[in-house]
Amino acid sequence: MPKMKSHKASRRRIRLTKTGKLVRTQCGVRHLLADRSPKRMRNLTKKTTTEAAGYLRRARYALLEGQA
């Protein structure tokens, strides 16, 4: 049986921290920006962490973290 491959698009977009949280960029900063305040845009450009169990499970499977 061949090796499991990690999902390369997920590999580029998200990463896991040492504590097990997921770090990713937020969506909504590409277009239709005129209606958004500078404060909102400033906060959207920052990285965000996710601890939702289902999202973490799917992300770990996509990244193949923790498998020998």
Image (tube, rainbow, N blue to C red):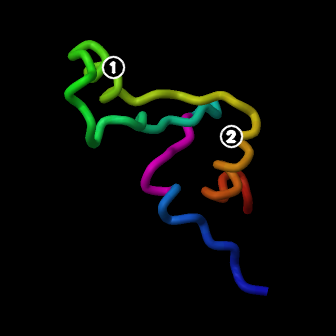
For residue 32, the mark is none
Mark pair 1, 2: CA separation: 23 Å
| Marks 1 and 2 in Cβ contact (< 8 Å) | no
Which image quadrant: the N terminus? bottom right
Q: x and y percent of residue 13 in the render?
A: 45, 50
Binning the other alpha carbons within 10 Å of mark 2 as few (below 14), some (14 to 19) or many (20 upward) gives some
Label 1 neighbourhood size at 10 Å, few (<14), some (14-19), many (20+)? few
Q: Identify the residue shown where x is 73% and y is 58%.
A: 67
In this view, which residue lies farthest toward the bottom?
1
Circle 1: element type: helix
The kind of residue tagged 2 is Leu
* Residue at the limit of the structure toward the top, as seen here: 39
- Examine the structure image and report whether residue 14 is included in the region drawn in magenta: yes
Which of the two residues, 60 or 28, is positioned nearer the viewer here? Answer: 28
Left or right? Give the position of 58 relative to 10. Answer: right
Q: Is residue 52 left or right of residue 22?
A: right
Picture layout, residue 40 above or below residue 3: above
* Tag of residue 56: 2
Give how far across and how far down residue 68 sits, in percent.
Answer: 73, 62
Side of 54 where 24 appears, left or right: left
Determine which of the numbered discs, if any, sits on residue 43 in the image. Answer: 1
In the rendered structure, which disc, 1 or 2, sits on the residue that comes first in sequence?
1
Residue at 50% of width from left, 35% of height from top? 23
Secondary element under disc 2, as helix, strand or loop, is: helix
In the rendered image, residue 59, in percent from the top left (x then y), is placed at 64, 49
Q: Which residues are magenta?
A: 11-17
- What amino acid is labelled 1 in the image? Asn
- Frontmost residue, 43 versus 62: 43
Rendered residue at 30%/36% (across/down): 29
**In the image, residue 40 lies at what x, y percent?**
31, 17
Residue, x 50% and y 65% (percent of image)? 8
